[in-house]
Image (cartoon, grey):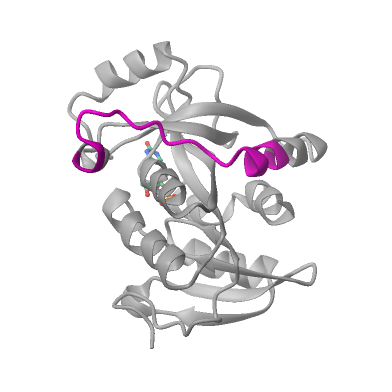
Amino acid sequence: MGTPHNRAEIGDIAEKILLPGDPLRAKFIAENFLENAVCYNDVRGMFGYTGTYKGEKVSVQGTGMGMPSMHIYANELMEVYKVKKFIRVGTCGSLREDVYLKDVVIAMGSTTDSNMNKDRFGSISFAPTASFSLLKRAYEIAMEKKVPAIVSNIFTSDKFYDDNAQQKNSLLASYGIAAVDMETCELYTLAAKHHVEALTMLTVSDHLLTGEKCTAQERQTSFNDMIKVALEI
Ligand SMILES: O=P(O)(O)O[C@H]1O[C@H](CO)[C@@H](O)[C@H]1O
Ligand SMILES: O=c1cc[nH]c(=O)[nH]1
């Protein structure tokens, strides 16, 4: 029967899912890391696949860019498809000198300039956080595999192009925030609402202090270390 954004039938999607923002990264992961992957969704080109990794059923679904897009896909995966474990595998901009291009940032919590949680919680400032067990496992596996990873609070921004970026970024970095993405706050908030587990892992694709950048091709495909850690979790 599906949803307005996903043509998967109930049961087509595994209880464990990887969530890249880019649907072509979902295709890349399915084709290069999963066995017997089957495409269950192509509505709006937002590809979703289910296959197996080391014998366990796992799915991978693109979520698009920004919290409103994450809101749609994560809500449907939690409410309709009953997915229980979510690992976002995204890209981010580094805000700190000690966080380098292609490092992996594991997001312990998310700070935001979005109004979505103000709309939900009114005067209460909700603190969206990762699943502790997924985070602990991610860090242990990254250390075992010698993947350069740090655990930190991140900033989930509504804007990729922000007129006040320099001012905001240096303020946030001075409070220890390592990196910026555009979806984690909504993923962690919905996971709390639905009593499911979520974690965000981000590979640094842009360094916002030095101006270094990964190419579009690298953004799609050069994040294999992070994906291997996510699948091992
Ligand atoms: O690489 P993904 O997962 O899309 O994540 C980051 O990249 C996009 C911006 O280029 C935003 O979605 C941001 O969160
Ligand atoms: O949200 C993002 C993702 C990658 N790079 C950025 O600068 N911001």
In the image, residue 107 above or below residue 11: above
Q: Residue at x 57, y 42 (%)?
A: 131
Q: Residue furthest bottom?
A: 1
Query: Which range of residues does the magenta coloring cover?
Result: 119-138
Pick the front one: 8 or 25: 8
Could you tell whether 121 is left or right of 82 in the image? left
Q: Residue at x 37, y 61 (%)?
A: 75
Residue 41 location, x and y as percent? Answer: 44, 79
Residue 222 forms part of the magenta stretch: no
Quadrant assignment for the N terminus: bottom left
In the image, residue 21 above or below residue 31: above
Pick the front one: 207 or 3: 3
Q: Residue at x 20, y 23 (%)?
A: 164
- How many tags in the picture? 0
Could you tell whether 29 is left or right of 176 in the image? right
Q: Splitting the image into 4 quarters, where does residue 55 fall?
A: bottom right
Q: Is residue 95 visible?
A: yes
Could you tell whether 141 is left or right of 85 in the image? right
Q: Is residue 213 visible?
A: no
Residue 132 location, x and y as percent? Answer: 62, 37
Q: Residue at x 27, y 54 (%)?
A: 68
Residue 115 location, x and y as percent? Answer: 20, 38
In the image, residue 67 above or below residue 30: above
Residue 226 location, x and y as percent? Answer: 64, 47
Could you tell whether 119 is left or right of 127 in the image? left
Residue 132 forms part of the magenta stretch: yes
